[in-house]
Amino acid sequence: MSAAIDWRAEASRLTFRAQAFIDGKYADAISGKTFDCTSPVDGAVLARVAACDAADVDRAVNAARTAFNDGRWAGESPKNRKRVLVRFAELIQKNANELALLETLDMGKPILNARHGDVRAVTECVRWYGEAIDKIYDEIAPTPRNALALIMREPIGVVAAVVPWNFPLLMAAWKFAPALAAGNSVVLKPAEQSPLSALRVAELAAEAGIPAGVFNVVPGFGESAGQALGRHMDVDTLAFTGSTEVGKLFLKYSAESNMKSVSLECGGKTPNIVFADTPDLDDAAKGAADGIFYNSGQVCDAASRLLVEASIHDEFLSKVASLAKRYQPGDPLSERTQMGAMVDATQTKRVLAFIDKGKEEGAKLTLGGKQVRQETGGYYIEPTIFDAVDNHMTIAREEIFGPVLSAITFKTEEEAVKLANDSKYGLEANLWTNNLSKAHSIARALRAGTVTVNTRDGGGIEVPFGGYKQSGFGRDKSLHAFHKYTQLKTTYIKIS
Ligand code: NAD
């Protein structure tokens, strides 16, 4: 057995990359401004990070455009791009402990989740798209014998990616890996709460052989750097993950600038439907608890609405509550911790306000509900369960993005489907039953981009992920992600 890692000691030895990464080099913001990057673990300032604005975004987009136009990456054969991306994945793997620590310090998730969840998935993602790119063929259309029509996918050009803080590097990788594999240049804006892993990974990309200008990272605030990317006249497509509210702004930015294509991975309010005929109630209870408390509930497809059949309500809720107790918040740097910190003070306040609202509107608080561990200087909230929730209450309608479960009771299949679909979101739905026909017919009726049956696992990089309704459009993961980063060209040739 390998020796246990002293993560706190490792953390004390870390150096942080705090400058933007543009055209293959680290650089301060042109304005010289920085912002404090604070750890939610204990409130310490980790680094003063370059606060990029429109001028820096312009510099990064110009570098990306120049690199794209001269073909230093787009012009490489798919096989060569594959070699570089596979090397990039290897470097991520080699530096996995450091990257995991950056995620934990920057956004407060438990270190083992960061190491074995996030960073492992990032490695797999980069390797998967690298491996895929020399195995995709284009098309020849059926034509009369005197013509030949080639239908080819070409890289779209300059890809801007604006991402959130809940899985900082993974949400970025879901975008930059397929975009780079397809031959594009990328300008990535990480969330202001969690820029450190993206800034470090840019260096690894360069070390792997991704040429200067092809992968740029501009840390900064949404209203400045994010908006500047959304409105830039020379960005060809903008891939966004974040809230529905900000997603809508990107549609406006596009309409008011150059009509760049926009893809949106936005919020969710996943219904987790548990029928009395569930094959294994313990397994379903574990799914329900993990589904809302993993990453402190800061997950777009968190199973935040538990729809439970009336006849098993008491038994099931007591199973979930006893599992929830294992998620008492602890030190994110300890390997024993199941649930870490909230990302920052703002998010903590927001979640606590939703808890107050739940009580005010008459839901029954059966577990948790309080901020804890204030003595650490960090931000922690207890696992929280509301019972007797009505689907019209605020806590059942709004995305809380915290460890707060809302339990709703139903009596019939029709009622379960109606409640599940009664949401502006449609990212994911989960259902538990041992009746195959019922599972199929309900899966069809659910308006969600992913439906899971008798599991919370919606699959790895090989399946698409994205939303219906106001959860957005476009898909991350799988070969379908290439649709966002390529465009089709028809070449129609007359043969005499
Ligand atoms: P957010 O929308 O506040 O921020 C996301 C990104 O947008 C950040 O980089 C931010 O700086 C930028 N931004 C903020 N305001 C902006 C503006 N006015 N103009 C341009 N850019 C702006 O979201 P968040 O709080 O970072 O993340 C939580 C949200 O992300 C949740 O709604 C969650 O559901 C969603 N999310 C969705 C998925 C998915 O795949 N569907 C995955 C993870 C997170």
Image (cartoon, rainbow, N blue to C red):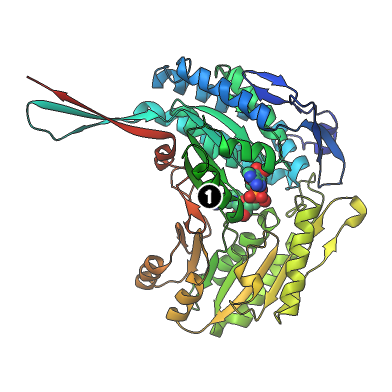
Q: In the image shown, does 165 or 237 lie closer to the viewer?
A: 237
Query: Where residue 35 appears, x then y in whole percent?
Result: 80, 36
Name the residue rendered at 80%, 46% in the picture: 334
Query: Where residue 100 appears, x then y in whole percent?
Result: 70, 37
The mark tally for this picture is 1
Judged left or right of residue 431, residue 24 is: right
Query: Where residue 228 appears, x then y in whole percent?
Result: 62, 36
Q: Quadrant of the N terminus?
A: top right
Query: Where residue 330 appears, x then y in whole percent?
Result: 81, 54
Where is 107 relative to 180, above or below?
below
Judged left or right of residue 372, residue 357 is: left
**Is residue 214 shown to the viewer in this render?**
no
Going by the numbered disc 1, the residue's amino acid type is: Glu
The residue most toward the front is 256
Q: Quadrant of the C terminus?
A: top left
Where is 300 relative to 317, above or below?
above
Name the residue rendered at 63%, 66% in the picture: 398
Crowdedness near tag 1: few (<14), some (14–19) or many (≥20) residues, C-alpha within 10 Å: many
Name the residue rendered at 68%, 43% in the picture: 223
Q: Is mark 1 within 8 Å of ligand 1?
A: yes
Q: Quadrant of residue 346?
A: bottom right
Q: Which residue is mark 1?
A: 265
**Is residue 342 shown to the viewer in this render?**
yes
Q: Quadrant of residue 299?
A: bottom right
Q: In the image shown, does 495 or 291 lie closer to the viewer?
A: 495
